[in-house]
Image (cartoon, rainbow, N blue to C red):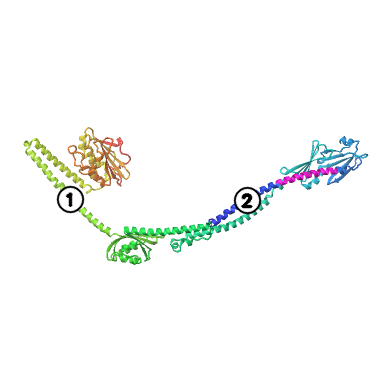
Amino acid sequence: MFARLSQRLSTRVAAATSALALFFVVCTGIGAWAVASGMMRAQAARQVAELARAQAAHAASLLDFAVVQVSPRILPVGGVERLRLGGVEVEIRGLDVSNPGDWSKSAAILGNPVGRLVAEQGGRVEFLLPAREGAAAVEMAVTLSALAAPLADGGNGEVLIRVGGQNAHAAIGTPPSADWQVAEAEVVLPQGFGRGQLLVRAGIGGDSLDLPLGRYALVLSLMGAVAIALVLALAVVTSRRLTHTLSGLADAASAFQFDAGATAGAGGRFHVDGDDEIARLGKAFAGMVERLESAYRDLDRRSQALLTNAERVAQVGSAIWQPGQSHQQWSDQFHAILGLSPADVVPSRQVFFDRVHPDDRPRLAQVMADALQPGSGRVVMDFRIIRGDGVERVAQFRAEVARDVDGTPVRVDATLQDITERKRMEEQLDGVVRDLKRSNEELEQFAYVASHDLRQPLRTVRSYLSLIEDSIEDKLDDETREFMDFIRDGVKRMDSLITDLLAYSRVGRRVADGPIDSGRMVDLSLLDLQAEIDETHAQIRVPATLPVIEGDAGEMTRLFQNLIGNALKYRKPEQVPQIVLNCADQGLQWEFSVADNGIGIAPEHRERAFGIFQRLHGRHEYEGTGIGLAICRKIVERQGGLIWCEGNSQGGATFRFTWPKMRRSAVSLAGGNLTLAGHGDFIDPEGHREDGR
C-alpha cells in the first residue's frame, strides 16, 4: 500500500512541497532568531549604559546628600553616631581639631573638607568636615557596600572608587562576569578628594540577552508543523486536482482500443474541460490519438491490400481458426484457390472438406487431428481439390499449431497453395531426368563400344603396316619410309585421343569415393612418370605428410599425374625441372598447389588451357591431345572444388586446386596416426623430400 502511494504523482508533489515549506520555516526561524538576538543585545547595551550613568549620578547624589546632612551636626570630641541618610548607613564621629591625627591639616587649620579612601571593611570613604567655632570637627565614614546597597534595585554591577592610587570596589547585586554586557559611568567625588573618581559599572548577564532556545525551538516547531500542515493540505488538493486529469488521460490511453475508438470516435474519449495547460494537453493528446487511429486504419487497409496482392502473386491463401470451433477466417486467395466467393460462403471446416477430393479427405483429417496431439504441431500435405466448376487441382496444405504455456492448442495458422503447375513440371522434369539417365547409359555403352571398335581398326592398321614394312624392307626408299612414319604417328595420335576421350567421359561415372591418402596418390603418380623424371633429371619436392581426403583413388592419382606430367613436359630446355608440391589448410578445405620453373602460361591463355582439345602449342613443339587439364578440372569440380593457374617468381606456372575436407581421422599408410597438414605451406626444406628419380 505504501509503495503504491509513494509512486503516485500527487504524493510526490505533496512531499516535495512539504519539504520545501519545512526548509523555508527552519531558515526563516534561524534568521529571525539571529536578528532578534542581535537587536536585543544592542538594546541591552543602550539600556546598560543609561543604567550605569543613572546609578553613578545616584551614588554621587547620595554622598552629597550625606555631606550636606552631616555638616551642621555638632558632636563632642569622641562622640559617635550612626545615621541612615537616603538609605545609606553613615557613621559620624567628633574629633579634636587640635589633634586631628593623620588627617590633612588643611581641614583642621584652613577649614576645608577633606576626603580619603580607607581599605578597611572592604573599602570605606571618610570625610573630615571643618569644625565650627567652639565645636569639634566631624568625621563622616561610609562603606562602599553601604553605598552600593541602595543601587541594587536598579540593576547589577559594582561601585569602584579610585583615590590617590588606592582602589576599592563593592558589588551592586550580582557582580558582572566576563560574558556580561557591561557599561561604565564616572562622576566626580565631593570636594576634598582631589582627583578621586567614582565609577559605576552596570551590566546584564549573557543568558538574559539571548532568547531562550528551548522555548524558541518549541515555538518554531509549532510554527513549522502548522506551516507544513497547511502546505501539505494545499499541496494535496492542488496535486490531486493536477493528477486527477493526468490519471484520467493515462487510464484512457491504456484502455484505448483502436477498434472501439474507430466506432466511438477518439475525440470524445479524451475530452478535458477547461483552458489551462492540463486541458490543452488533453486536447492535444486526443488529437494525437485521433490521428494515430486514422493512420492505424490506413495502415491496416494497406497491409490487407499488400497481403492480398502478395497471396495472389504467390498463389498462397491463409486461414486462421481455433481448435474445436467450426468458424474460420479465410483470406480472399484461400477462397479463390478453393473456387469459392467470400460473399457466398461462411468459412468453416465443413466447407473446406467439401472441396477436398473424397479419396484424400480421411488422410487429411487424420493428419490434422495428429497435429493437435501433444508433441506435434506442424502439417505439410499435398492433396487434390475439386473446384465448383469440376476442375481438379493439386494443393499443398501447411498448418502450424500455436499452444499456450500448458501445451493446449489455441490457434491454427494455415496456408493453402495451388501447386498444380508445379506438379506438372515436376512430372515433366522426372521424365527428362529419366530420358537423360537413359541417354547417359547409352553414351556410356557407346563409349565402351568405341573403346574397342574404334581402336581395333587402328591396331589392325598398325599391325599390317609393320608387316608391309617387313615384307618390302629392301624395296622402300626414304620418301616411302617417311610416309610410313606419318601413318604410324597418326595411328598413335588417334589411339591416344580415343584413350583420353574415354578417360574424360568416365570421370565420375564409376567411382568409389572414400578416404584416400593423398601422399600415396602422389607416390603412385610419380611411379607412372618415373621414365620422364629420369630422362629430365627433374627434382620434385613433396611434403613429408599430406592429408587424408575423401575421393576416388584412381581420379586423384590421374589428377596429380596430369599436373606433374605437364610440369615435366613444358620445361625449359636449358634448365633442370624444379617441381614443388604443397598443401595448405584453408579451414573447410585443403588447397593443393603444383609449381614449376617451366615455360609458364600467358595470363590471357590460363583459363582457355582447361578447355577440352585446347592446345597452346603445335604438335611439333609438344605432343598431346589437349584433354589432360580438362580431365583435371572435371575431377576437381566433381568434388565441389576449384582449379586455376597462376604465374610464379621463377617464370613458370603454379596450378592450384581446392578439395573439401574429409570427416574422419587421418591414417598413414604404415597404419599409425598421420598428422593432417594445414599449418603452413610446407616450405621448410627439412620437411620435404627430394625426388630426383
Quadrant of the rendering where the C terminus is positioned: top left
> Quick check: is 59 in the magenta stretch?
yes
Q: Image point 67% across, 50% down: which residue?
A: 213
Instruction: Name the residue beneath numbered marker 1.
Output: 445
Magenta-highlighted residues:
41-66
The 10 Å Cα crowd at callout 2, few under 14, some 14 to 19, many 20 or more, is some
Q: Identify which residue, 261 or 416, lies in the foreground.
A: 261
Residue 326 found in image quarter = bottom left
Amino acid tagged 2:
Val
Judge left or right: residue 425 versus residue 250.
left
x and y percent of residue 655 in the render?
A: 26, 40
Which disc, if any, is residue 508?
A: none
> Quick check: is 58 in the magenta stretch?
yes
**1 or 2: mark nearer the eye:** 2
The rendered magenta stretch, by its main secondary structure, is classed as helix
Q: Is residue 382 above or below residue 158?
A: below
Instruction: Name the residue beneath numbered marker 2.
Output: 26
x and y percent of residue 278 in the render?
A: 52, 57
* Labels 1 and 2: the sequence-earlier one: 2
